[in-house]
Image (spheres, helix red, strand yellow):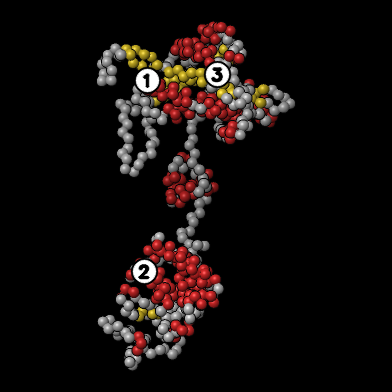
Amino acid sequence: MAPLGFDLNQEAPLDWDNPIDWEAIGEWEGPAHALGYNFVWDDGNNGVASFQRFIGDHDDDADDHGAQQGDADDHGTQQGDADDHGAQHGDASDHGAQQVDAASNALDHGGNNNTGEASGGRQRKFYTDDIKMAIYCDLLAKTKPPILQRGVSKEVAQKYSVTRRVVQRIWREGQLAGGIHGVKNKLVRNCGRKRIEIDMEAIKNVPLKERTTIRDLANALGVSKSALHSRFREGYFRRHTNDLKFSLTDENKKARVKYCLSMLTNNIPNAPTFKPMYNIVYIDEKWFYRTRRNQKYYLANDEERPQRAVKSKNFIEKVMVLTVVARPRFDEHGVCTFDGKIGNFPFVYVEPAKRWSPNRDRGVMVTKAMTSVTKEISRQFLINKVLPAIKEKWPAEERGMPIFIQQDNARTHVAVNDPAFVEAAQADGWDIRLTCQPPNSPDLNVLDLGFFAAIQALFYKGTPNNIEKIVEKVDKAFREYPVDRSNRIFLTQQSCMMEIMKQNGGQYYNIPHMKKKHLEMTGNLPISYECPMEIYNQALGFVG
C-alpha cells in the first residue's frame, strides 16, 4: 500500500471511523525532533492513534525515537531476551525486581490515586519514588539505552495504569540524570508552604491582658491564629494558669522565714537538716461539694451528654470536714507501722425530719450539714474528737513526748492557751500542745499543700446525691489515700520551706521536683532534706 498523502505539519485529516494503517506509513528519514510532534497513545479511544502538537517543547516528546526504530517486531531479534539485557546493566535489573514488587504493593494499597490521568483528567498526579523507579527498571529491561523502543512505553504504561507521557518522562529523567536515582522526586528538600517566622521575643512586649487567649495574642502579634497555635504545639511558648496568692506584709514574710528556721536542726559547721516532723499533727477544714459546676467527661461520638441538675447553682450541697493527719512511720524494712491518718470529722448533725417527703417519712433521723462553725464548735471538736483520736492512734513508744497540733489563724479557732483545751491535752500524762502556722501561709500546711487536692480528686470519682453520701465518699477517699504519697508530701513541704527562705519569705516560687517517687523505688528516699549553708545564712540575715 502506498503511503498516505498528508502533511505532518498540518492538522491530521483523519477519519476516525477508519483507523490508520501504520504499516503503510513510510519512515521519516530526518531527525525525530524536527517533526515537532509528540505521539501520545490515548487509551480511552479503543486503540485509535491521535496526534497532539506541542509547539516549542521538543523535550517532552520521548516517543520521537519510535519513528527511527520502525516496527517493534523488526527489532525483537536485535534486543534479545530481557533477562540477558538486564545482566548487561548490572544491578539495575536486580533492583528493578525489588522496585516492581514494591510498586505493585503500592498500587494495590492506594495506587489508585495515580490512575485517573488516563481517563481524561488534566490534574497532574503524584507518583511515589517506588513506582517511578519500578517503571524505569521495567523500561531498562525491555529496551536498550539511550533509545526507547517503540511499543515499550505503551506496554509499561498499561502495566502500571499510567499514561505513556508519564512513562516517557520517567525514562527521560533517568537518562538525563544518569541512573535510576534520577527519577526520584525532587520535592522533599524545598516544597510546600514556607514557614511563617514569628518573633517569640515580641510576646514579652504584649500586655498580659492582651494575651489571655491564642486569638488575642495572634491579633497582638499580627499573625494568624493557626500559625501561632502551631508554634505553641512545637513548644516555642507555654500556657500558664495563674492563681491568686495571699498578700504578705513584711512581718508576714519574717514570720514565715522564722517558722522555716525553727524546723531546722543546727548542725554547724555541717549543713543543717530539716526535722523529721514526726511529732507535728496538722489540722484544717475544707468544704466538699456534692458536685462541681463544670465537670469534664469523655464520651463516645454517638453518646448523649449527661444530664445534671440542681435547684440552685449558687447553693450546691456541701459539707465542711476537719481533717487530722501526721507523718507516717515505717520500719527498717519499709513496712508502714503508723499511717498518720488520725481522723476525718465532718461538721454535721442529726435531727428528725420535720416533714414528709418522697424520700423518707416524717420523724426519720436525717443528717444535715452545719451552716456555720463557731469557736465553741471548734473547741468541742478539738476536745471531744481530735484529742481522743490522737491518744488512740498515736504510737505507744512515743507516748509522753511533746506533740504539736498545728492549725491556721482562722478567727473561729481556739487560742493556743485555751484553758479547756490545755486541761484536756495534758490529761493522762500526755503532752499535747496547740500551735499556729504563720499568717497567710497555706504552703506550710501539708493538708493545703497537697493532701486536700488528692482527697478531692478521689472524692469526685463518686457521685453522692445527699449529705450522708458526701460524708461517706470523703471518708472513703481519706482512708484509700496511699501512705507512701502522704509521706512524700512532708518532703515536699521541706523543699517549699527552702524556697521560702530563698525568696526571703515570698510566696512566688515554683514547687521543686525532687523525683521522690524514683528515690523511693530505688530505696534512696531521705527522711529529711539538707538545707544549703548559703540559704541558711541568708535566712538568718533576713530575720536579723
Q: Residues within 10 Å of mark 3 (few under 14, many from 20)?
A: many
Which labelled disc corresponds to residue 234?
none
| Earlier-in-chain disc, 3 versus 2 | 2
Amino acid type of the residue that numbered disc 2 sits on in the rendered structure = Glu
Q: Is any part of residue 541 visible from this angle?
A: no
Q: Position of residue 315 (x, y in %)?
A: 35, 24
Q: Is residue 155 above or below residue 29?
A: above
**Closer to the camera, 319 or 139?**
139
Q: Position of residue 538 (x, y in %)?
A: 67, 29
| Earlier-in-chain disc, 1 versus 3 | 3
Amino acid type of the residue that numbered disc 3 sits on in the rendered structure = Val
Q: Is residue 270 above or below residue 366?
A: below
Residue at the bottom extreme? Answer: 2
Determine whether the residue tagged by mark 1 lies in a helix, strand or loop.
helix
Which labelled disc corresponds to residue 281?
3
| Residue 272 in which image quadrant | top right
Determine whether the residue tagged by mark 3 lies in a helix, strand or loop.
strand
Residue at x 30%, y 76% (from the top left corner): 46
Q: Position of residue 347 (x, y in %)?
A: 42, 17
Which labelled disc corresponds to residue 468?
1
Asked whether the beta carbons under mark 1 and mark 2 sit within 8 Å of each other, the answer is no
| Residue 261 in which image quadrant | top right
For the C terminus, the image quarter is top right
Q: Which residue is mark 2?
A: 117
Spatial separation of the CA atoms under disc 3 and disc 2:
80 Å
Residue at x 40%, y 89% (from the top left corner): 27
Spatial separation of the CA atoms under disc 1 and disc 2:
72 Å
Horizontally, residue 498 falls left or right of residue 107, namely: right
Amino acid type of the residue that numbered disc 1 sits on in the rendered structure = Glu
Residue at x 32%, y 84% (from the top left corner): 20
| Earlier-in-chain disc, 1 versus 2 | 2
